[in-house]
Image (spheres, rainbow, N blue to C red):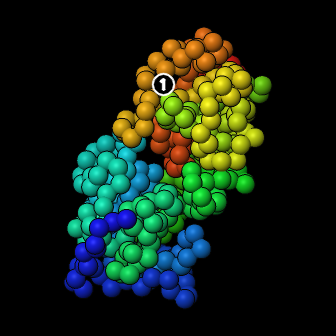
Amino acid sequence: MPSPRRVLSALALPPLLLLAACGTEATESPAGTAEGYPRTIENCGREVTVEAPPERAVSLNQGSTEILLSLGLADRMVGTATWTDPVAEGLEEANATVPRLADNAPSFERVLEEEPDFVSASFVSTLSEGGVATREDFENLGVPTYLSPADCVKSNEGAGDGVREEPLALDTVYGEVRDLATVFGVEERGEELVAELQERVDTATAGIDASGVTVLYWFANSESPYMAGCCGAPGIITEAVGAENVFDDTYAEWPQINWETVADRNPDVLVIGDLTRESQTAETAEAKIRFLEGNPVTRHMDAVRNERYILLSGAAMNPSIRTVEGIEKVAQGLRDLGLAD
């Protein structure tokens, strides 16, 4: 739990109303004005209202951060946190202008130091007990919060990363883009970004046929590896290229599966997370491959013996706009390996 909280002064934030009882039709308005506000959006079973376009936003996860940067909102951000990888290509300059509060999760107090008027996150765990703070903690101080819908459409009860009963769709990610564009009054930019992402998916998957090819997604940890279940971002990638996830019978988001079971499934291709953070063992792709080729259980797997590896950022393996990058890289990787037309 966070240490005792610092209470913001009444002058630290603009007046904000949370959990409003009624919605307001959202229309495009010039940045920095209150025209067309207040605005209310539905988010993960809540109504979130902003009285004016946020000017001091903090994004607590990389996925949410990259949406805001892609929408051209760096000048309205005062902090980011929780990174698994370098920022997406093309966003480096914008990202450099926004303070990084922490490489991992910041304290509640550190976030409040920036006097935020809006806080966004990608994961339920970030805005809950044991995370940075709960949504109620922020809302009690008049700070609206937004949580990625992709993380709300699964069960987050119990330990682990949750369970999905239904496959995630890219439309949910696109919905997050549109929501955040609405909050900040840049709906036209949101539609342009969605159209760009859709075009990239269409280009990457045009004519691809990877039917009969089995893949496995390894995110991190060598002792108790986190492998992708059926229905999260890796499920989107696998379906887009027409392949099969060897753990598509597992509904947990990132179940920890022993190496004997992995070797028994013997996938054709290993999609390997290439992370730059330092919170688990075997974060980088180099460390993962070194483990696979030296471990007596895994070194005889077909994919290992034939070096059939495709490397992805951690961000691409989580539900985000980077999942489109995952589709592109897996599609190209399968083609390069001669496993897809």
Q: Amino acid at mark 1?
A: Lys
* Residue depicted at x 44% and y 76%: 136
Percent position of residue 213, x then y = 73, 24
Q: Nearer the viewer, residue 248 or 262?
A: 262
Name the outermost residue toward the bottom: 21
Toward the viewer: 9 or 294?
294
Name the residue located 40 percent from the left edge and 78 percent from the top edge: 139
What residue is pinned by disc 1? 288
Q: Which is nearer the eye, 45 or 56? A: 45
In the image, residue 150 above or below residue 135: above
Residue 97: % across, % down: 24, 52
Dividing the picture into quadrants, the one containing residue 261 is top right
User: Picture quarter containing residue 211?
Assistant: top right
Q: Is residue 230 left or right of residue 233?
A: right
Q: Provide the secondary structure element on which disc 1 rests.
A: helix
How many C-alpha atoms fall within 10 Å of the one at disc 1: few (<14), some, or many (≥20)?
A: many
In the picture, residue 217 is in which quadrant?
top right
Q: Is there any visible trace of residue 338 in the rendered image?
A: no
Q: How many marks?
A: 1
Q: Is 269 on the left-hand or right-hand side of 88?
A: right
| In the depicted structure, whether residue 116 falls above or below residue 219 | below
Can residue 311 be seen?
A: yes
Q: In what quadrant of the picture does the N terminus appear?
A: bottom left
Q: Identify the residue at horizontal 51%, vertical 61% (top origin).
A: 124
Outermost residue toward the right?
Answer: 212
